[in-house]
Image (tube, coloured by chain):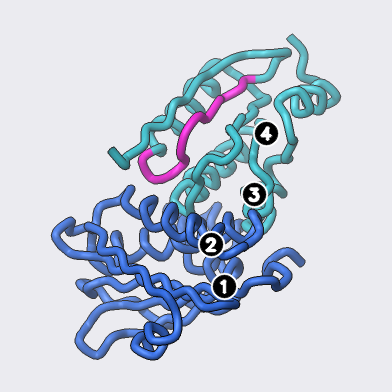
Amino acid sequence: MLEDELTVNIRHRDGVAIIDLIGDVTTFAEEKINGAYRQVTAKGDRFILLNFRQNDYINSAGIAILIGIVTEVNQNGQKLAVSGLSPHFQKIFRMVGLAQYAEIYQTEEDALSAFKRLGAVE
Amino acid sequence: MSDVEGATGQVIELRLPSRLGYERIAMDTAAALARRMGFADERIDALRTAIGEAVTNAIEHGNQADAAMKVVVVLTVRPDELIISVSDQGRRALELEQTKTRPHIADAFQRADKGGWGIWLMRELMDEVEFTLAPGGGNQVRMVVHLERSPVGDQ
């Protein structure tokens, strides 16, 4: 009842791998998020967007999972951004320091425009 | 302390099984209460995160995720503040020194365990946070959030 499942969906737009995270990002989300990241990395994607849905629950275990993703993104020379975070979680991403490694955009469209400037094209 | 608070405020007590996910019950209850007290949305979000971390710690660490052990959450309403106390049954005691550290993301990149953000977030987001060890065993954290004060952690 309370172990909310996270739905993870992978899409591609304009040369960017978009990983939609629909639901809660807690310890239960680890396998799905890491699996999605491994999948896009195996396909050679260099530009990755984690697209959150407003008002979700992200806790410190979820933050640790995301730091794990950032660690690998840096090692693999990829570029990571996030979109769709509520103002509260934008603030937490800045406090933790995640925002230094994954640029925060309000919307998916904003993130895609920024990736385009960095050279992502279909 | 809780007797005095009980005599002057309204007290709500939750007893939760030590299973991850139940922290949401405490988060939702505290948020509903804080909304009725007139807290701003931003403060309610901060409260949700802080209480979620406190209950998750109690479940995972203090009670070692033994579902038979309870986490007790006491919410005390005062005219100008909300006091949240979260207690576990202390299967494992918290090291109080570890409640004062500030984690750094660059260090986390080097570690296999990238966690350790929960208590720091609680301290950043709440107006007062105090950890104590009950004499009979059990960890307790007492957090206070004041009404009509500029948010902490925004600077």
Q: Chain of mark 4?
A: A
Q: Which residues are magenta?
A: A17-28
Foreground of the two, A73 or B52: B52
- In the rendered image of this protein, does residue B78 appear above or below residue A21? below
Subunit ID for the residue under disc 3: A
User: Regarding mark 2 in the picture, which secondary structure is present there?
Assistant: helix
Question: Which hue is chain A drawn in?
Answer: cyan
Can you tell which of label 1 and label 4 is closer to the viewer?
Answer: 1
Residue placed most toward the observer, A44 or A87: A87
Indicate the amino acid at tag 1: Val
**Marker disc for residue A98:** 3
Q: Amino acid at mark 3?
A: Leu
Relative to residue B102, is residue B48 depicted above or below? Answer: above
Mark 1 in CB contact with mark 2 (< 8 angstroms): yes
A40 in relation to B29, above or below: above
Instruction: Identify the subunit bearing mark 1.
Output: B
The tag on residue B145 is 1
